[in-house]
Image (tube, helix red, strand yellow):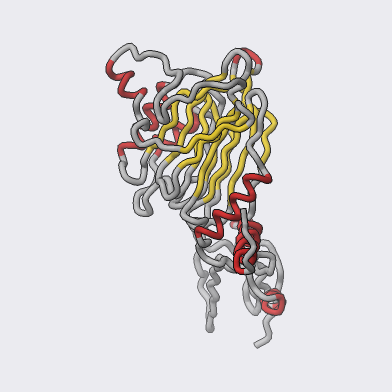
Amino acid sequence: MACHVELQQPYDRSQGEIGCHHHWKKFTGTKEHETRPFKGTRISFILFTHNACEELTPETVTKLQELGLTAAGSSRQRDPGALAEEDFDQAFGRHRKECPPPNGAGMVAVECAGWACGRGIAWLSFDTGAKAAAAADGHPAGAAPASNEKQAAIALMGIKGAKSDKTVLNDTVQVHTFPKNRVGFHVSELMLDPTGFLKLVANRRFDFYGRDQAMDDFALWVGSLKRGTVVLIAISDTAIAKTRPMREPVYKALQQLGAAKDMEVIGYRNPFVFIGAKGLSCGEAHMLLDKRSQSKTVLRLDARVGVGSKGLVKITDVKDSTITASDMGARVLTSRELRDQGVKVT
């Protein structure tokens, strides 16, 4: 039986009945559909797109396209699996030297990689504008005194589990690096001072992985923030457990910080970085999310936060310096090859 191949867009219901006698016809199988009465033999091919469909050889791509299967390509390097911790750490260390945190009034940065990158990494930075005495890690440096026990309890949410290594660059830029393999949201709460520089109120960690209640704690804490509070968020492993998805209160809280109402769901071991502020309209915050659970992508956002019209926080000069998975893989391979040759990698 001869069969004609047509490369086409999927049919939709507005086009009515699909005539598929001796023809391949493509339609979206997730939409409700049915087979009309017919005589004879009907053959259906149900095709699923594998996540390696862009990792095929050119010869295979050509054969598939001749059959009308256009979701194929050779543009992506095959996923090598989790990157060895030593190799990733060396490559990432060189990257941080090449792309240091930004400095200047209102400048912030957030960068993270997921568990598949040497058990994960996350750091964030902000410019204080002046030398400042180091506050004890995890303790509020500028929080307003609580007026009652409930507010005092909210002010301490996420404080106990927050740990980071703090370094200072150029005397004024604080960089907080969070531990590997440390689950949940890593959060820095910041306030703009009158000169346009930033002051750390507290570092916090909301352990959604270990405590479902932490999702409600996060929502309660965000709800208590003063208008204009700047919030940076990163994930250094996974925010949630594989069998327990992030619940609605977290997304509602992120919207109070400027997240879009239709933001994508944060899944298991999805890298995520966020720059927002209390009182921003939905969609005014900036974020990056990689939906691949074993992602080797390194997400990086730089931005300037300041005061706009009507005294509201505004985010400008946004820069996305994300390293793609294939690029990160190449950098890791370079580190490994240099080490194998006896070259010291710093």
Left-right relation of 295 to 183: right
40 vs 208, left or right, is right
Above or below residue 208? Residue 276 is above
Residue displayed at 50% across by 40% down: 177
Query: In front: 326, or 200?
Result: 200
Could you tell me which residue is drawn at 44 percent across and 31 percent down? Answer: 203
Residue ID at (63%, 50%): 94
* Residue 196: x %, y % from top left: 63, 18
- From the viewer's perspective, tell me whether residue 188 is left or right of residue 161: right
Q: Quadrant of the N terminus?
A: bottom right
Farthest left residue in view: 149
Q: Which of 41 and 106 is in front in this view?
A: 106
Q: In this view of the protein, can residue 260 be seen by the observer?
A: no
Taking depth in this image into account, of 64 and 26 the one nearest to the observer is 64
Vertical arrangement, residue 277 with respect to residue 166, above or below: above
Q: x and y percent of residue 35 in the render?
A: 51, 69
Q: Can you say whether 241 is above or below 262 in the image?
A: below
At 63% across and 24% down in the image, what residue appears? 106
On the image, the x and y values in percent for residue 55 come to 63, 69
In this rendering, is residue 101 above or below 51? Answer: above
Q: How many marks?
A: 0
Residue 206 location (% of width, % of height): 38, 37
Residue 56 in sight in this render? yes
- Along the line of sight, the residue nearer the viewer: 129 or 109: 129
